[in-house]
Image (spheres, grey):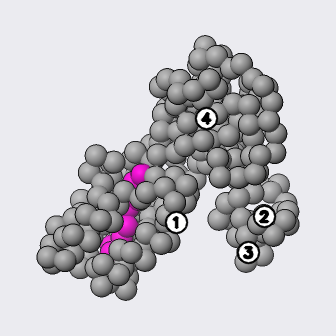
Amino acid sequence: MDGVLNLLKPPGMTSSNAVVDVRRLLHEKSVGHAGTLDPGAAGVLPVCVGKATRLFDYLMEKEKEYRAEITFGISTDTLDSYGTITEKTGTNITKEQLSGALPLFRGEQTQRPPMYSAIKQHGKKLYELARRGETADLSGRERRVNIAALELIGQTGPQSFLIDIRCSKGTYIRTLCEDIGKALFAPAHMSFLLRTRSGRFSIEDAVTVAELAELAESDRAQTLLVPMDEAV
C-alpha cells in the first residue's frame, strides 16, 4: 500500500500519535508524517505510507497555509494557549492597528525558533529541556522564512483576531504572533491554529482518523491514498 494520506489532525493529538493510528489501521510499518503540526493545532497533516515515505523531504519543502488566532494582552512560555502565562496586561489593540502592522511581516525575514520546539541541541529536543526548566542558547538558530501572504480576517473577541498566513516551510506561527505583539508593544500569543493547506493537500479533502478506520474495516482505505505522482 503506497501513497499519501491527507489526514485531518484534531487538536490534542500529536503528529506522532497520528502516525501510530494510521500505521495500526493500515497494517503498514512504513508510515510517517511530512511536517509536524503542534499537538494543540488542528488541520492538514500529510502522512506518507509505504514507498511514499521516500517523498518526505520533497513534501516538507512545500508551501503551507494557516488560519490562526492571535490574542493580545497575554504572553505564555510556549507562545500558545497551552503554556504558562508569563505576562498579562490590559491592551486595546484595534483592527486598524493590527492591519497596519501586518505588512511588516510579509516577505522574507529572519525568525528565531521558540524554546518549545522540536529542534535539537546536543541530541535533546528543546521542548524537553524547557519542560525540565533548562534553557538553551538560541543564538545562531535563526532561520530565513518567507511569508508570502498575511491577512486580517476578522475580530473574534475583545483582543483576539483571526489572520490567514501563507508561508514557507519552517515558519513558526507562534513566533509570528509574538513578534506581531512586539511590533504593537503588547504581549501576545497564538490562541488557535488550523493548517488549511500543505503543498497540494487542502483541508477540504482531508479525512479524519474515524473515516479512515471505517474504510479500513471494509478494506477500502487504499481509496483515500493520493498516488505518489499526484502528491508531488
The amino acid type of the residue labelled 1 equals Thr
Q: Main secondary structure of the magenta part?
A: strand
Q: Give the mark nearest the N terminus, 2 or 1.
A: 1
Q: Residue pushed farthest top?
A: 96
Q: Give the mark nearest the N terminus, 2 or 4.
A: 4
**Residue 7 placement (x, y as % from top left):** 35, 60
Whether residue 96 is in magenta: the answer is no
Cα separation, mark 3 vs mark 1, equals 18 Å
Secondary structure under badge 3?
strand
Q: Give the mark nearest the N terminus, 2 or 3.
A: 3
Residue that numbered label 2 is attached to: 130
Cα separation, mark 2 vs mark 4, equals 23 Å
| Pointers 3 and 1 in contact (C-beta within 8 Å) | no
Whether residue 50 is in magenta: the answer is yes
Cα separation, mark 4 vs mark 1, equals 22 Å
The amino acid type of the residue labelled 2 equals Ala
Residue that numbered label 3 is attached to: 124
* Residue 229 visible (yes or no): no
Secondary structure under badge 1?
loop
